[in-house]
Image (cartoon, coloured by chain):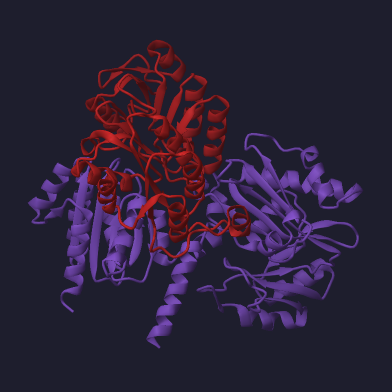
Amino acid sequence: MAILLDENIKVIVQGITGKQGTFHAKSMIEYGTKVVAGVTPGKGGKEHLGVPVFDSMKEAVEATQATASVIFIPARFTYSAALEAIDAGIDLLTVITEGVPVQDSARIRQKALDNDVVMVGPNCPGLISPEASKIGIIPGKICSKGNVGIVSRSGTLTYEIIQNLTVDNLGQSTCVGLGGDPIKGIGFNECLTMFENDPQTKQIILVGEIGGTGEQQAADLVKKEITKPVYAFIAGQTAPPGKQMGHAGAIVHGKSGTAKEKMRILSEAGITTVKTSSEIPLKIKENL
Amino acid sequence: MLKAHFKDLKKKVKSVFNSMPMLYEIEGKQLFKENKIPTPLFKAYTDSSSIIQFAEEIGSDVMMAKAQALTGKRGKAGLIRKVSSAEAEEYIQSILGRDHGGKPVEIVMLEQPLEIEKEYYLAVMLDNESGKYLIIASSRGGVDIEEVAENYPDEIFKQYLPTAVEPFSYMFVDLGKKLGFEAKTLTSFTNIMTKMVNMAKNRDLTLVEINPLILTPDKKIIAADSKVVIDGNSDYRQVDIAAFKSQRARHTDLEFEADQAGISYVQLDGEIGIISGGAGLAMATCDILEFLGSSPANFLDVGGGADETKIEKSLEILSRQDIKGIFVNFFAGITRCDDVAQGIINASKVFEIKVPIVIRLVGTNDKEGIQILENNGIKAYGEMEPAARKIIELVQGGN
């Protein structure tokens, strides 16, 4: 069954006629994703990659009944594109764009929450349920279908881990790249809960980074509610102590943003932590 | 000697990693002024005549001279002093160019001294967890606020405000009363609060901190210090702030050059230069070099969708750093391996790369990328760890 997306999900690509939009919409279509429409204001009525293009999200949703959209639009226009998607009634919004002003991300996130929209990103690689559908830019050929759910704050590092799993015959249920920005849509905990409730997922991998507190909250949730085995890898283990938001940041979040501290907290919650990404398949196989 | 030098480098590295896009105090106060948040009178020192002018302006012979720096503890370092206009020039000359947190002092600010009845702490930050503005306030200001949080947690007050909400004075009345403000000072406080939130919104600031906020004996509330952090993603719409001197000063020359090209680059002190895509993989690349007994000379993330020119620029930057080898590690998603490969080939024709280079290339268009490299006699690796081992062997093998 996987989480968030299956083979039936209908997807609109916002910015489909741009360079990135074209390249990755094509790769999504080739992977089997039901890309039913594209939106580029001013190019409505045309066809691109064999897909109809609309001037607005409203028109595209009305014509196709799509429930998901993915944004490949420059950072300065992302805010309005995201609001447009939410107003058009999308359920799943994925923002690939990098460099979105954090205040814009905060506002998009609030609007998504208010409208029960699942927002993934910004600055993220998107998500994939192998052999079913992919939304975003995760290279499809490194994935294989199976029982491992992956939730990650990183993009390229996730590919690394997916490939290691695939090589070791450990397929994936769904891989979700949450994005690396400080303010973003859904986080570890939403995905952990979905994986816990998904029959296909048997193990969960969490890929974190230095900074922020998402990993600590995930540790709390895993301790209380997650029964499936969880494995974690944190990037930045050898980096000097993480970035801090002045003193105000230290008060709110404590001083626990280092990789070492995160790994300690995750271990205490019963999560298997590894030092290098290539250890993950070995640890999973040990426990099978 | 060597050991001390190494220790200094480590310290410097740490300060670089910790550096948020912060503003100088004087720049923050310029923003306060622009937003009508009361500050003491202040002026940037230019030469001895600016001291005399300033003394006339404030109607006093005594003034504060404050070195501008992006790291804290200026007071303890002797970089802030109350001086008479006769002493000012000599003192300022003694602190200009002095090292603080790995950077020489370049700017000194002159400021009107304040009479203090009470000191408060006030901050507005864009909170990552909630995605809302978080206001933090305490009537125990002027000291290290982390200590207050530890010793007097009940005297720190917090209030959340959604980013889309327009702030009004009435929203801060409760908070003002908790801090002990009343009558005229309560109105002053709620006005300042409103202006602070508006300033954070209009100027895309992720932190506005005032410590101390001062209540004077004649019941005026004044921002005696400023700590402001900006959002680098908003540079395009805050062009004047992005051009502030602090934004140049917080980078080394190479880092600044990289930043201008849209490349995240941090200079470190190891032996192998790295080029990677994505912050996570770039960090993991640094990690694996350390785990395998070497060390990264830098962190470099070309960002998503990097084209040939960014790769060329990255190699150019590394060619100017003192390194023993280069490890290029890509698992491309939005970036295309053929662009990476072509960028490397282009760069190698322009800049002489004298050190060994190992390339690991996987992901979008990797076949095309590997072909480009092979056409130029370069073999690409498919996996990260063997590639890392290879570059370390090439770098350390000759020793």
Give the colour of chain A: red
Can I make out residue B220 in this image? yes
Along the horizontal axis of the image, is B50 left or right of A121?
right
How far from the left and from the top, in percent, is residue A179?
42, 42
B202 vs A47: above or below = below
How far from the left and from the top, in percent, is residue B356?
18, 66
Residue drawn at (66%, 53%) of the image: B31
Along the horizontal axis of the image, is B179 left or right of B239?
right
Which corner quadrant holds the N terminus of chain B? bottom left
Residue drawn at (82%, 42%) of the image: B173
Towards the viewer: B248 or B119: B119
B65 vs A46: above or below = below
How far from the left and from the top, in percent, is residue B308?
25, 48
How far from the left and from the top, in percent, is residue B18?
50, 62
Taking the view exactly as shown, the residue that stands out farthest to the top is A63
Give the colour of chain B: purple
Can I make out residue B262 in this image? no
